[in-house]
Image (cartoon, rainbow, N blue to C red):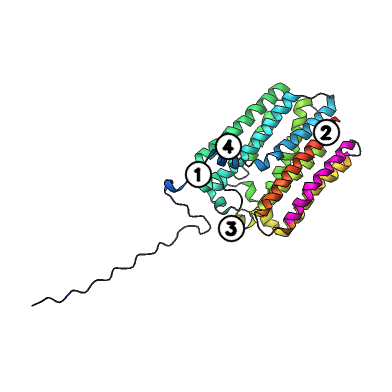
Amino acid sequence: MAGTPSKKRKRPAPRKNTPRGNPQKAHVSRDPRHVEKATVGDWIGAARLRTLPLAVTPVLIGTGAAILVDGLFHWVLALLCLVVSVSLQIAVNYANDYSDGIRGTDDHRVGPARLTASKKASPRAVLAAAGIFFAIAAAAGLALVIHSAQWWLLLVGAVCIAAAWFYTGGKRPYGYYGLGELFVFVFFGLVATVGTTFVQVLSVPQEAWFGGVGAGLLACAVLLANNLRDIDQDRAAGKRTLTVLIGRRGTRVLFTVFVLVPFVIAGYLGLFYPIAWLALLGLLGALPAILIVWTYRLPRELVVALSVTSLTSLAYGAFLLWAFVG
């Protein structure tokens, strides 16, 4: 007797893999073959060259104020101050890349991709890069301390490095609690400018303080533009920047104030140093940046405002240097 054909068993449909974990985080393949290694260009990009003029501005102003005191250009000391300032800026950029990357804050960035979040470089490598530039800044700072014999400046240097690290590093980074602008104003404005003047002539004229305020406010404006660009991503990641706390309109108003007040200071200094009036030419860049912040439609447009404001800061510092030595 012919056997009855057996019924074909239906194979169970393949199970769909439901994504697990934080839905806000980007899903990057774990296969290293699908992740390109960081190139030299990637490492240079992670140093965020757009922000480096902010490190040059206080050194220009502080050096000009020092020349006012004794009429001499201490170029070696000025160069060491520049190394300290630029190295700290690069170090904090790499440190932010590392800290935000391991927290997942950068998984949905609108701006240039970060090394850690993109998996193009290991967190350890990015941390090592930050450490190298912190070490360079410390070495140049130590040389300045030895020359000036002002040993208490070692404490100031240590505080600067700690502030740079804990901006986004550590268990409770202050940049996540709306304090980023305050520390940028203090360390990349007042401390950098006044410190540059002091280590050269062991004195601080009021011009250094006025210039430090202007440099610090422009640095804060750049940070505001950066955080306005990332406001939605930061809010989703739990990063409570000042921009997240006060909202878009409040950030726009504050950005406008931070950009314009330095030019009011330049106008005041122009009463005593006429060349300082030329700093008002920086408004040719500042006003378009303000317009972008108020009218942008896409977050990436704020990258232009950030870059223009940073270059405006550099021009501002150069004109004040000229005014003080002219």
Residue linked to disc 1: 120
Identify which amino acid the numbered label 3 is placed on. Ala
Q: Position of 150 compared to 325: left or right?
A: left
Q: Which residues are magenta?
A: 269-293
User: Which residue matches tag 2?
Assistant: 322
Q: Is residue 150 left or right of residue 22?
A: right
Label 4 vs label 1, nearer the camera: 1
Give amino acid for label 1.
Lys
Query: Horizontal and vertical percent for residue 213?
Result: 79, 41
For marks 1 and 2, give the CA distance.
43 Å
Task: Report whether 102 appears left or right of 16.
Answer: right
The main secondary structure of the magenta stretch is helix
From the viewer's perspective, is residue 207 above or below residue 295? above
Q: Which residue is mark 4?
A: 130
Cα distance between the residues tagged 2 and 3: 45 Å
Q: CA distance from mark 3 to mark 4?
A: 26 Å
Q: Nearer the viewer, mark 2 or mark 4?
A: 2
Q: Which residue is mark 3?
A: 236
| Cα gap from disc 4 to disc 1, whole angstroms | 16 Å
Mark 1 or mark 3, which is nearer to you? Answer: 1
How far apart are the two marked residues, 1 and 3, measured between alpha carbons?
24 Å
